[in-house]
Every structure is written in structure tokens, then in C-alpha cells.
Image (cartoon, rainbow, N blue to C red):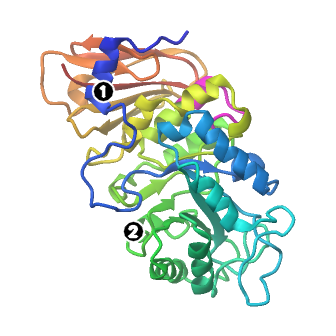
Amino acid sequence: MRYPLSLAALALTLAACSQHPTTTAPTPSGRLAATPPMGWNSWNKFGCNIDEELIERTADAMVSSGMRDAGYKYVNIDDCWMAKTRDAQGNLQADPTRFSHGIRAIAEYVHARGLKLGVYSSAGTATCQGLPASLDHEVADANKFAEWGVDYLKYDNCNNQKRPAIERYTAMSKALQATGRPIVFSLCEWGENKSWEWGRQVGGMLWRTTGDISDRWNSMIDILDKQVGLEKYSSPGGWNDPDMLEVGNGRMTFNEYVAHFSLWALLNAPLIAGNDLRSMSDSTRFILTNRSVIAVDQDWGGQQGTRLRDDPATNTQIWVKPMRNGGRAVVLLNRGSSATSISVATADLGLTPASSYQAIDLWAHTAQTVLGVLQAGVPPHGAAMFVIGKK
């Protein structure tokens, strides 16, 4: 069913979107989140059922599965890692049973495998699960994260006492910067206060645009629809975040997961896997490690992907993203329950006029000459994805 990448197709893929997933347009040296962050987070699959063994085995699996080599580098511990109370000095501390060796030890384990560690807190008096959080403890907590060797902070919005969001997120941003340690700052504000409008100004590097995703087609599609109009807020160093990936968690079909991953890549979304990496199937690995699709996500061509056409009568859509070499990434999305053919005129894609174009199917790994219309058969709740450009 899946074709190996031929030498010809490989050459075209390299030319169109780079086989190396982290190659991007020039950005300031050392900028954090110069490309959309890639990694894994514990919440979608495990919730509060986490411990240090899970995190360490996940780091091992990220290496052995090929995900690290495909560009994934952050191993992020979500809610429930902390003890029920702060220590005698008022500092956050890890749960003494489930994380008995502490966060620093886990960071060292993760770093030894060429990966980075992320943790979670909330811009409130307690996390979403009622554990100690960072409101009015920003400096102490940021210093502790830096001391432990943390590389990424997901900062939630629960129990916020209705205090202004910009004030709360700015306080943590300043505290993180003052530590001198480079820590990616992820604003999990759910878009309640339009964080895409101010997230970058307060030091955020990605900001949630919606509430939580769930492992359902309708949830993913609802979040997709809410991304329309947010394109102008995304660029290197600051990304719209439609929430984490559900690929491999078992409640969507293979085709639905292909569509999910394709669309998130087209949106320049952070690619944060949320499945059990220790036991993922070959089909899940096939999706998550598709370097050609990842390359689209990591390529900055001047604008996040946008919805070009929406046809409610046929339940189809066309999404397009400029690539830095002048080509276009295209997702033909079938939101309906029956297979259908979807087409788009090359003249509508914003390409430089040419007599013909070369299109690479990023899932079948095949190439075709396109004379004026890009067309593909698309399964129900599925997507076809191409990079198209001059031959």
C-alpha cells in the first residue's frame, strides 16, 4: 500500500521541501522556537497516570522509534508531576512517590539522549488538577525550573482568580528570562483573551488558540475551523498552537490521523505527539515520522497555511501554504463520509506562471507532472497532501 521513495521522487522531495525537518528560512541565531516546537506531552494519553519511569522510557522510545532523528526533541511532563504541597522553603517539589528522584534527575536522563525536558504549571493558584501552581510564585518557580535543567514550560490558565491574563503571563515570562536559561514558553491560555494578539509581546513562543483537543474527528475539525483568520499572528519565534496531536491514541481512523497530521503541518503548528511512544504501531510511526510532511511544518515561506476554498456542498476544502522556495504545500481535505475527487487549478495557488509543474504526493511518495489542475481521489475523513512547484 505504501511505496518506497524512488531516487527520482527523493530528489524532487529534497528540492521542494528539504528532507531535513529542521531546515528553515533564515532566523536570528539562537532564537528559541525559530521553528514550531516538536516533541511529546504526557497529557493526552496518560493524564495524571504518570511517573518517572514512564517519562524515561518515553525518552528512550523517542530515540529508538526514529522520532528524535525526525525532529522531535521535547519530552514534556504535563499536570500532576508536583507534590500536593510546596516544601518548607515555599518551592515546588516533585511528587515524592511517583517522581522520587526529582525533576533534575529526569532532565539529566533526557538530556543524555539528545533531547530536552519540559514541565507544566499554571498561571493560577493551583493547576487544573488542584496541585500547587505559579501565580505569585513566578520568580521562585522559574528559578527552580532553571536549576533543574528544564527547557520548556507549558503554562496553563486554571484557577487564575480572574486576574488579567497579560499580567499573569508577563510575570512568568520575565521570571524565566531573568534565570538566563533558554526555556521555551508555551502559553496555554486557551485563546480566551485572544493570546495570539499579545502572546509574542509578553515573551510567549506559542499560544493556544482554542480549548483542549480530544481524540475525535469532530474535535479536530472544530479546532481546524477556528484557525481561519489567525494566519497573520504566526511567524518564526511565535506560533499559533491548535493543541497537541492525537495521532495514535486509537479513537480516529488511519485516514483521519493522516488528515490531522497533514493539516497541523500546513498550519505551522507545534507538533507535540500525545500517544504512547513505547508501544506505537507501525502505522502511527509512519505518520509521525513522515519527514516530508514534517518539512512542510518546519518551513517558513512567509505565511502559515490558509484555507483557500471551502465547499460545504461537497464537504471538501483546499488548504495552501507558501514554501520558501516559491512552491506551495497543498492539502485536499475531504470532510465528508464518502470518497471523492478534489481538484484545484494551479492558477489559484499563487504559483509563478509556468507551462507545467511538478507535484509530490507526500504520503504516497510519488511525483506527477501537473499541467493546470492538481487533482486527487481522497478517502472519507481523509486528506491528500502535495508540494507543488516549477519543474
Q: Earlier in the sequence, mark 1 or mark 2?
A: 1
In the image: residue 233, left or right of residue 45: left
Name the residue furthest front: 112
Task: Residue 350: give x, y in percent of width and height.
Answer: 21, 34
User: Residue at the spot x=12%, y=21% of the render?
Assistant: 354
Q: Is mark 2 on a helix, strand or loop?
A: loop
Q: How crowded is mark 1: few (under 14 residues within 10 Å), some or many (20 or more)?
A: few
Q: Is the magenta stretch mostly helix, strand or loop?
A: loop
- 116 or 122: nearer the viewer: 116
Q: Does the magenta stretch include residue 271?
A: no
Q: Is mark 1 on a helix, strand or loop?
A: helix
Front: mark 1 or 2: 1
In the image: residue 22, left or right of residue 277: left
In the image: residue 305, left or right of residue 336: left
257 w.r.t. 211: above or below: above
Place residue 147 in its image quadrant. Answer: bottom right
In the image: residue 180, left or right of residue 42: left
Please state which amino acid type lies under the numbered disc 1.
Leu
Place residue 237 in its image quadrant. Answer: bottom left
Image quadrant for the C terminus? top left
Task: Residue 201: give x, y in percent of width and height.
Answer: 38, 74
Q: Is residue 274 visible in the rendered structure shown here?
A: no
- 310 or 79: nearer the viewer: 79
Please state which amino acid type lies under the numbered disc 2.
Arg
Q: Is residue 48 visible in the rendered structure shown here?
A: yes
Residue 200: mark in rendering: 2
Q: Residues within 10 Å of mark 2 (few under 14, many from 20)?
A: some
Task: Residue 277: give x, y in percent of width and height.
Answer: 68, 38
Name the residue furthest bottom: 89
> Start and end of the magenta stretch?
246-258
User: Residue at the spot x=53%, y=79% of the render?
Assistant: 172
Residue carrying label 1: 14
